[in-house]
Image (spheres, helix red, strand yellow):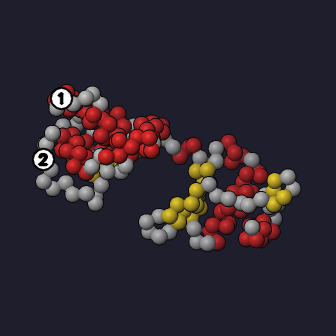
Amino acid sequence: MEDTLDICASLGIRHPQVRGLLTVVSTDLLIDLSSGKQLAIAVKHSSELAKLRVIEKLQIEKTFWEARGVEWRIFTQREVTDGMRENLLWIQPYLNPDMASYQELGVSEVQDLLYRLKLHPRTKVTRLCAKLDDQYGLDPGFHLSTLRHAVAFRFIRAPLDKAFHSWTYGDLALRETVSVAGVNNAS
């Protein structure tokens, strides 16, 4: 709080308070990047950015983090495209801890799925997954479920800004740390 009091004094901004008592200035999200750097993110609805007091509080956050060499950004709903929103809703159930049975997915299943999709590179993967279920005599939704899980757990890289139902094989890639050598069409 000493730091934010100093920042407020230097910026000429009243320090945040609740019922007359000073309150801690917090940041919504602090991300540790693999590069060793950090990224601080303030999450706000875009309509909030028209309010002077909100801007003042954001300025306190920004100054705090930048003084520590941490990049700081504001995130609003405008940063989420329609395709991204649709994709996040599509994979979200697979990130739920109650879906523990689906967390058994292994690299070989993902490799097999990509091999099968590769044979039809221009077909939309959602349509192709249904055909593959029929072709391999599997329960309806098996291949699509495998794809959803693989994207959710980042076995497969996919363009999350592009709606999943428009993806083709060319939009997908196995994560670099996983080798695809020797993959065959095992069922």
Q: Mark 2: which amino acid? A: Asn
User: Disc 1 marks which residue?
Assistant: 137
User: Disc 2 marks which residue?
Assistant: 184
Identify the element where label 2 is drawn. loop
Q: How many marks?
A: 2
Question: Residue at horizontal 28%, vertical 58%?
Answer: 176
Q: Is residue 129 left or right of residue 136?
A: right
> Depth check: 136 or 38 in front?
136
The dot on residue 114 is none
Q: Position of residue 127 (x, y in %)?
A: 27, 30
Which quadrant is the C terminus positioned in? top left
Q: Residue furthest right?
A: 20
Q: Position of residue 61 (x, y in %)?
A: 67, 61
Question: Residue at horizontal 72%, vertical 54%?
Answer: 55
Eye-nearest disc, 1 or 2: 1
Q: CA distance from mark 1 to mark 2?
A: 18 Å
Q: Position of residue 128 (x, y in %)?
A: 24, 32
Above/below status of 159 relative to 31: above
Q: Do residues under tags 1 and 2 come within 8 Å of each other at their CB atoms? A: no
Identify the element where label 1 is drawn. loop
Q: Position of residue 154 (x, y in %)?
A: 36, 51
Quadrant of the image occupied by residue 137: top left
